[in-house]
Image (cartoon, helix red, strand yellow):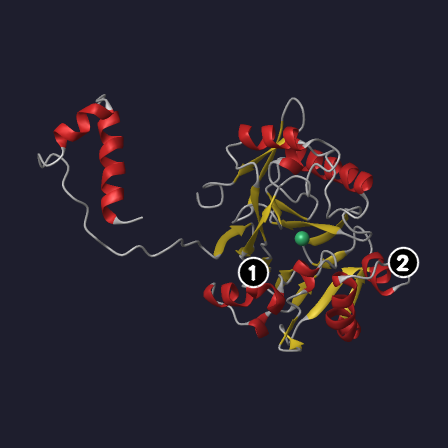
């Protein structure tokens, strides 16, 4: 859009604010009532790529790995309902009906003694589609990749393990790793479907196996970070509860994949959930816990910076993005 079109739009809006009909516009043109805007170049969209706050004695940094845009949400979301039902839900939430965005937001936690990264983004393969930006965001946030002490993998989908390697070498060269035993065993055993996840597990995860700790539900990862069973999205998908100085935050990874559809309609089936019914049951259990406890939560696919609260509503839940809760002192 060039400058003159923009001027017209502003003039029109201002005229409407003044209670003037569109017919009044020609009369105002050229009167000097609306000075022309300075002609600075359009710079294109800009988005923040990291967001840091304190949680008790922990310092948490949410790091954007980017986002991809797709057709949908239906039928990726709402596989068991009509396209029209999804369109109505999107419209009610001020969202487009036929396009949507999936963001990827790993969390980095400085516990005071260790730097713990949850998930690694899409990695090099994601770069041609607007993702794979974790290492750039990490650098912009003030960290070097070799400072990361522990990499926790919530599950083995490509948008979570794709960034384990960079140029065929470990992207976080000094890190040890943690993952659910059940998740590792599934993807390295005979039952996993052939596909991108399995290929990436072979390429990115298995070569690092000797540096992995294998977690059971409720196991600690480091002091103040505990694994929570969240099976369903994948067989060994894990959430994690962070606790420091009496403050809590729940990281629920891919328990929800869309901030409206997954929360307002937790029973709607999602293509990415390997076990639809189990994933829906887990979704409701985790959302109920977060709503009841009033914990702040971070979800990997929530809109950046992907931290907020879960409000219980008459029919289900609602995403409440965090505002200044972590900033006030
Ligand atoms: Zn994911």
| Mark 1 C-beta to ligand 1 under 8 Å | no
Nearer-the-camera pick, 203 or 11: 11
Q: CA distance from mark 1 to mark 2?
A: 30 Å
Nearer-the-camera pick, 97 or 317: 97
The residue wearing badge 1 is 129
Nearer-the-camera pick, 22 or 89: 22
Q: Is residue 275 above or below residue 183?
A: above
Q: Earlier in the sequence, mark 1 or mark 2?
A: 1
Q: Is residue 169 above or below residue 129?
A: below
Is residue 246 visible in the rendered structure shown here? Answer: no
User: Left or right: 294 with respect to 154?
Assistant: left
Which residue appears at 73% of the width and 38% of the height? Answer: 79
Q: What is the quadrant of residue 19 in the picture?
A: top left
User: Left or right: 89 with respect to 285?
Assistant: left
Which residue appears at 63% of the width and 63% of the height? Answer: 120
| Mark 2 C-beta to ligand 1 under 8 Å | no
The residue wearing badge 2 is 191
Nearer-the-camera pick, 28 or 158: 28
Which residue appears at 72% of the width and 42% of the height? Answer: 270
Q: Position of residue 271 (x, y in %)?
A: 73, 45
Q: Position of residue 60 (x, y in %)?
A: 55, 55
Q: Position of residue 297 (x, y in %)?
A: 61, 44
- Crowd tier of the residue under label 1, counting other residues whose Cα lies within 10 Å: few below 14, some 14–19, many 20 or above: few
Q: What is the quadrant of residue 168 in the picture?
A: bottom right
Q: Nearer the viewer, mark 1 or mark 2?
A: 1
User: Left or right: 261 with respect to 191?
Assistant: left
Q: Is residue 7 above or below residue 22?
A: below
Q: Secondary structure at mark 1?
A: helix
């Amino acid at each position: 859009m060039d400058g003159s079109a923009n001027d017209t739009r502003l003039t029109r809006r201002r005229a409407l604010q003044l209670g003037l009909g569109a017919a009044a516009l020609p009369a105002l043109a050229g009167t000097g009532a609306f000075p022309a805007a300075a002609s600075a170049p359009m710079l294109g969209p800009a988005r923040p790529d990291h967001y840091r706050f304190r949680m008790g004695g922990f310092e948490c940094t949410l790091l954007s790995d980017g986002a991809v845009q797709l057709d949908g949400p239906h039928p990726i979301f709402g596989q068991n309902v009509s396209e029209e039902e999804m369109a109505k839900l999107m419209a009610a939430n001020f969202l487009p009906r036929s396009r949507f965005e999936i963001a990827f937001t790993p969390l980095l936690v400085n516990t005071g003694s260790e730097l713990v990264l949850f998930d690694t983004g899409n990695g090099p393969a994601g770069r041609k589609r607007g993702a794979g930006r974790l290492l750039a965001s990490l650098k912009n946030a003030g960290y070097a990749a070799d400072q990361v002490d522990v990499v926790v993998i919530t599950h083995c989908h490509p948008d979570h393990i794709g960034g384990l390697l960079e140029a065929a070498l470990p992207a976080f060269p000094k890190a040890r790793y943690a993952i659910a035993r059940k998740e590792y065993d599934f993807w390295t055993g005979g039952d996993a479907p052939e596909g991108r996840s399995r290929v990436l597990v072979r390429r990115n995860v298995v070569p690092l196996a000797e540096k992995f700790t294998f977690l059971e539900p409720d196991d600690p990862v480091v002091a103040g970070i505990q694994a929570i069973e969240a099976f369903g999205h994948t067989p060994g998908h894990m959430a994690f509860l962070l606790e420091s100085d009496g403050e809590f935050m729940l990281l629920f990874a891919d328990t929800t994949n869309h901030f409206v559809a997954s929360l307002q309609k937790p029973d709607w089936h999602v293509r990415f959930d390997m076990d639809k019914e189990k994933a829906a049951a887990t979704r409701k259990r985790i959302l109920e816990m977060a709503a009841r406890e009033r914990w702040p939560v971070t979800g990997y696919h929530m809109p950046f910076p992907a931290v907020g609260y879960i409000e219980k509503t008459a029919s289900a839940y609602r995403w409440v993005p965090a505002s200044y809760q972590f900033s006030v002192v």
